[in-house]
Image (spheres, rainbow, N blue to C red):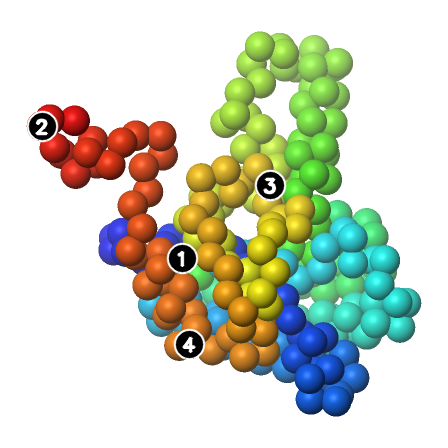
Amino acid sequence: MNHNIPQHVAIVMDGNGRWAKSRLMPRPFGHKKGVESVRRAVKFCVNNGVRYLTIFAFSSENWKRPKKEVSLLMSLLMKTLKKEALELQEQGVSVQIIGNRLGFSQDLQDTFDTIEQQTKEGSRLHLSIAANYGGRWDITQACQQLAKQVKEGGLEPEAITEKVIANTITSKGVPDPDLFIRTGGEVRISNFLMWQLAYTELYFCDTLWPDFDDKAFSLALQSYADRQRRFGKTGDQLTGDSNA
């Protein structure tokens, strides 16, 4: 395993609307171009040894956007999943949808189920698509599940450990991200994977998501490779300095 390559990359794909606006185009045009960047990022991960990719497709807060834009995003999400399913399967990509599915139409929920089933054998890249997702919601729903188990007598409160919680949140079975990328110039995580990002390396860039190409992705990986991940230890401990 190449430790200079992050095993898991998480991305907040920001800047679609501003990209379109700068070209005097409507915001939906930016979202459509953003899909091309997702396709490019998936191929980049497959070709460069990244094993897990999580993308923030639609947050629980995005419902506050204009109804017309939300409707278009739902339509675009469904069309994209249906269109890309076969290619993802051929690339060896397995797809998982994380988030509160109950907020979506039944047709879209059925589409989620279909692509997950169709790609479940993929072993080169695990692609998690966060849709109607919020980090606080994820932790809250995990707490509710565990509280129910305690109430029913199947779990002692003292048995609730970090590992138990990690196995109850929606990304269970997927390692925590090594590298978090946010495009578009904003410097915040926006309620994304709040539990999972505890020790993740953060990378922010001004590049708008539709312009995030292989070169931009490579720069993010280079930044990651240049860092020393200490997880609470000292740098001397990691380098084996006998005087540490």
Q: Earlier in the sequence, mark 3 or mark 4?
A: 3
Which image quadrant for residue 145? top right
Residue at image mark 4 = 214
Query: Callout 3, which amino acid?
Result: Met
- From the viewer's side, name the closer residue of 186 and 52: 186
Q: Earlier in the sequence, mark 3 or mark 1?
A: 1
Could you tell me how far apart the alpha carbons at marks 1 and 2 are, in whole angstroms?
A: 35 Å
Image position, residue 194 (x, y; %) = 60, 41
Which image quadrant for residue 123? bottom left
Q: Earlier in the sequence, mark 4 or mark 2?
A: 4
From where the camera sits, is residue 183 visible? yes
From where the camera sits, is residue 91 visible? no
Image position, residue 99 (x, y; %) = 70, 49
Who's the residue at 64% across and 55% down the image?
130
Residue at image mark 1 = 51
- From the viewer's side, name the closer residue of 194 and 46: 194
Which image quadrant for residue 63? bottom right
Residue at image mark 3 = 194
Who's the residue at 61% across and 60% down the image?
186
Could you tell me how far apart the alpha carbons at marks 4 and 1 are, in whole angstroms?
A: 17 Å
SS at mark 1 in the image: loop
Who's the residue at 83% across and 52% down the image?
103
Query: Callout 1, which amino acid?
Result: Arg
Assess whether mark 3 and mark 2 are in contact (beta carbons under 8 angstroms). Answer: no
Could you tell me how far apart the alpha carbons at marks 2 and 3 are, in whole angstroms?
A: 36 Å
Mark 2 is surrounded, within 10 Å at the Cα level, by few (under 14), some (14 to 19) or many (20 or more) other residues, namely few
Query: Callout 4, which amino acid?
Result: Asp
Could you tell me how far apart the alpha carbons at marks 3 and 4 are, in whole angstroms?
A: 27 Å
Residue 242's disc number:
2
